[in-house]
Image (spheres, coloured by chain):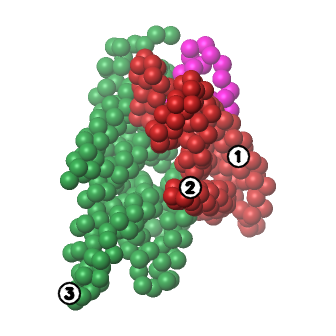
Amino acid sequence: MTFDTHLAVQILPLLLRGLVVTIEATLGGFVFALVGGLVLMLGYRARSSLAGAASRGVVEFLRNTPLLVQLYFLFYGLPLLGIRFSAMITGVLGLGIYYSAYIAEVYRGGVDAVPHGQWEAAQVLRFSRAQTWRRIILPQAVPPLIPVLGNYLIGMFKETPLLAMITIPELLSAARQVTGMTYRYTEPYTMVALIFVTISYSTSLIFRRLERKVATP
Amino acid sequence: MTSSPTVLSFLPVLLRGAAVTLEVTAASAFVAFVLATLVGIARVSRVQTLRVAATAYVEILRGTSALIQLYYLFFILPVLGIDITPMEAAALGLGLTFSAYGAEIVRAGILGVDPAQWDAARALGMPHNLAFRRIIVPQAFATMLAPFGNLLVELLKSTSLVSLITLTDLTFSGAQVITSTGKPGQTWAAVLLLYFLMCFPLAQAVRRLEKRFTLYRGLARRPA
């Protein structure tokens, strides 16, 4: 069996429509994870030990179970509790929740790297705890993390094919649609693989350059 | 209507699935480890062709997603006339994906060994290959253990993808139990819990290993 270039070009518009959904889900999930990760990290550092234990428990659970099953749980389980979201919202939530556990750890590393004197100085200057976080700690902790966060963005992009399993019409769904219509597997899956490599490799080059910038102040 | 069967009564089905999950994990970990070692060494080889080929391997496999690679093997190899069982496709597919990440660990491990160790080996008259085997690899191996452990946890989680190429692993068994019980929420919760019970102890063991190793490095670095 050979590779039918004509077919590959013909299905490209269909695949690109799927790609748009993939990118929307990735960006939506990433924004959710950036915020969710922050909440979990602040939970670690909260003065209440209950919040600390709860955050750590949530992070451990999310990191030690597969994303696919978490998605199934949200997609099939939430409606039973009377919570109904569209598949797309469920998918974005699923990706976002899963990755907030990883991003919480990234933030934690960044916050640990801020010298302790900064906390003391803020205290001496009568900054409230919330002000210290907002004005002193986070502005120093987060920028050096941008390359690492970029890696998670690419990682998330590569996990999006799982969304096809909860009926979201993303890139892999589009390819499966083509296989259903044409009974050809080589062209659609090869094209999907090529699209993934192109986007994740070029994005990783951008973040590698950023990394160099961050590393040399 | 009599009450539908409980999820708990289907625990044996889920446990059989969990056994398949562990089997797939072991098989793909083996494939990944062998390939990662070869490719990782090629990444730091003195032969440029090898270096370029290994870099392409890593970038391509890391650039696509694990599920796409599984689909590729499972659907396209048969079209090319190569018979492959779902188990083989799973071990090979996940093995390939994770070998790319593993190769980067091997590479970092080898490059992480103090270059003075190479110089010392040469000063003692050791040929390059012997120095690599006896001096560099043993030291690099110690630093690779914890990252390999973390990768193993990720691999264990990723085996849930094999349910999509018809293997009856834990995730697939969960879907089967739902058709019998009609209780998706409870069943998926039970499946999540079983995955957690497999992954968490492994992750904890890796953490302990990491701590112990940092301690050992700390002692080794302290000047006498």
Colour red belongs to chain: B
Residue B11 appears left or right of B31: right
Visual hue assigned to chain A: green
- B25 or B12: nearer the viewer: B25
Q: Amino acid at mark 2?
A: Ala
- Residue ID at (43%, 62%): A105
Asked if the residue at tag 2 contacts the one at tag 1, i.e. Cβ–Cβ closer than 8 Å, the answer is: no
Q: Earlier in the sequence, mark 1 or mark 2?
A: 1
Which residue in the protein does label 1 denote?
B22
Q: Which residues are magenta?
A: B69-89
Which residue in the protein does label 2 denote?
B220
Q: Are marks 1 and 2 on the same chain?
A: yes
Asked if the residue at tag 3 contacts the one at tag 2, i.e. Cβ–Cβ closer than 8 Å, the answer is: no
Q: Amino acid at mark 1?
A: Leu
Which element is circle 3 on? loop
- The residue marked by circle 3 belongs to what chain? A
